[in-house]
Image (tube, helix red, strand yellow):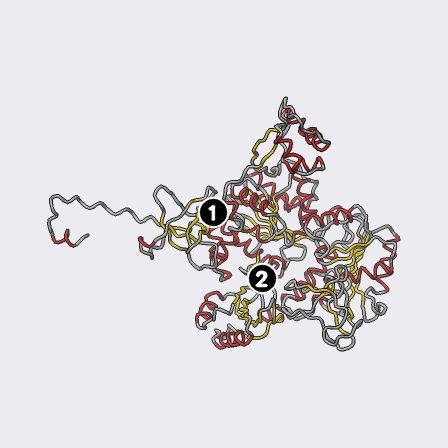
Amino acid sequence: MPESARSGAKSKPAAAKPRPAAPDRRVAVLLPLPLREAYDYRIPDGMDLGPGDYVEVPLGPRRVIGVVWGPGAGTVESGRLKAVVRKFDAPPMTDVARRFVDWVAAYTMTPPGFVLRMAVSVPAALEPPRPMLAYLRKADAQAPPGFKMTEPRRRILALLDDTLAGGPPRTPAELAEEAGCGVTVVRGLAEAGLLEPVMLQPTRLGRPDWHRPGPSLSPDQRAAADDLRERVISGRYSTVLLDGVTGSGKTEVYYEAISAALEQGKQALVLLPEIALSAQWLDRFARRFGAPPAEWHSELTGAQRRDTWRAVAKGEVPVVVGARSALFLPYPDLGVIIVDEEHDSAYKQEEGAIYHARDMAVARAHLGGLPIALVSATPSLETKVNADSHRYARIALPARHGGAVLPEVELVDLRRDRPPARHWLAPSLRKALTDTLAGGEQAMLFLNRRGYAPLTLCRACGHRMQCPNCTAWLVEHRLARKLQCHHCGLQQPLPHACPECGEEGTMAACGPGVERIAEEVAELFPEARAAIMASDTLHGPRAIQEMVESIGRHELDIIIGTQVMAKGHHFPMLTLVGVVDADLGLNGGDLRAAERTYQLLHQVAGRAGRGERPGRVMLQTFMPEHPVMQALAAGDRDGFYRLEAEMRLEAGMPPFGRLAALIVSGEDPTLVERVAMALGRAAPRSETVHVLGPAPAPLSLLRGRYRRRLLLKAPRSTQVQPLIAEWLDRVEIPPAIRVQIDVDPYSFL
């Protein structure tokens, strides 16, 4: 109340009473930038805004997209507030999605704006979709005088004849492709008045039909499917491990959960670790539901991402299958989440906002009150411990579908069964390949190493070809005649002479990659039809699909490949799997080295004998006594997990303890070392909390940045985020230095 009113002072008779001030209409807008808080903006007259609305706001000299996060904080004076420029005509971000962004940000210690950027990854999708130009055949139209009717023009008109009888209009690109001519031919006909233009809205994918009957399920599969269906129909949160051996039909079982979600009018999300797995998966889905799902991965075009994002937000897409980023799409009514191959390390994002998609998916399901199924034949130890302790439910599929049996696993001791000099396949594996081909069956040779050779060196002076930007050797890719760094992507031609001593003809390839194995196969079996299946040779889902179909039609006899072919594929005539270097993943002392090696080799072995013919797996190893090799040979999965759990429990390592890493990086190695040492001195320590380091990262130089690591180790019950926040507050970090926080690290490179 003004002082004059309190003192009883009289106003001048001619003066009007002061009007009450307009209410301060402001909102907090979170921007998809590395910002830790939302900014206040004024709501202009005539605009109504609510939480979740997508808006455009000024930020300095530019305009940016943001999301209304709630009421304004009121910390900025009204006169200094900038106004919201406009509100987008798009469904608002749901309350669950906003809480999910905040939860991920808090857990991973990432600025909320940085997490929001993953959820608003396609700003163009907020604009109304632009209609597409298409054409009909114009009835009774005559060509103008002098217009030459060429053969391509006749083909275009013939294609459009059906539109006179009510057929659908056709886009210029469709007409040009079918008629085998250029788009200019279509335009010429339109300019001549022979075609009638119409504007079409972007077409949507067909809607999967849950009414379609699925395949016949075994009693175990039916019980598992019914369990999942009941969880979806209940509409309550639960996490269940669908634990089934390779070939047990896990996919068909969780399709029933998707069917239940569609029956309820809800959406379903299926996460796959790699788009390489999607080719056969998409075919199976389309056969089951009569229409494909929407896809979400890095190989989509900008237009595909825009249309899919907007269609998901409007609830027009019932099912999405995608990589880890699909978790952040704007689902208005999600009913179930499936995480296939939940153990796969590809679910861990190591750049930008560092998170594990499996763990974030569980959090998303909990926040949304919906069921989630984690699917694997070789669950992560974290998931298995949660299932064993009944924190997660567990559904088991212990047998292969259709009577197929698990393959026999043999250990090939390379200390005794040695390959010839400069060759990599042991005599026993060579004989098995010969027998397999003679029987008209297919074989797979697995080596998780791309290219021709992992190292090239000079025989004269010993110089090794190393990446100038990374602590890594350059990998020779002989088919492409280049050396490449698999960490930063640097490429350079194969040298004719040593860059160090200048000697010519002295550069030698050391060790095998898949290209070198293919070379040996061509030497041993010149009549066999062989091909390489790796991410270097197969670019995108279409190329992978073509390769998979070719294998399924038995157009290939021997497939040589990396982990691209290790899981998810079903080849009935594939009866032999040979692993060239089974010890490869055990090197380096990684916390999860044994677990990851077991999972990968188990998945590779699972490709054999999935049809009527029995399978055989041969693992070449220098360490047949290693617990991983012994467990694979004995088929004792649970025994391996028990041993691994005992070792982790004794060491206080995950899942029985907590880890968090700080990665200090910069272009000045002296400054990086100084900051890392300061963090080491300021580190939190107690009887239960320990900090290791700083120490050079295994990749101490990555993409031109020098790197040091510190590792915080604490009991499972410890909340590490507050400890790390207080730790960082005690050290001044120069602008030239980046400190990344990796809560629950999966890789230690």
Mark 1: secondary structure: loop
**Cα separation between marks 1 and 2:** 26 Å
Mark earlier in primary sequence (1, 2): 1
Q: Which residue is mark 1?
A: 93
| Residue at the image position 31 percent from the left and 49 percent from the top | 24
User: In this picture, is 10 found above or below 428?
Assistant: above
Q: Which mark is residue 573?
A: none
Q: Position of residue 640 (x, y in %)?
A: 68, 64
Q: Position of residue 136 (x, y in %)?
A: 62, 29
User: In this picture, is 416 found above or below 442?
Assistant: below
Mark 2: secondary structure: loop
| Residue at the image position 58 percent from the left and 75 percent from the top | 695
Along the viewing direction, whichever of 44 and 173 lies nearer the viewer: 173
Horizontal side of 672 relative to 214 (left or right) equals left
Q: Position of residue 204 (x, y in %)?
A: 59, 38
Q: Which residue is mark 2?
A: 350
Number of numbered callouts drawn: 2
| Residue at the image position 19 percent from the left and 52 percent from the top | 1
Residue 693 in view: no
Along the viewing direction, whichever of 722 and 203 lies nearer the viewer: 203
User: In this picture, is 622 found above or below 362?
Assistant: below
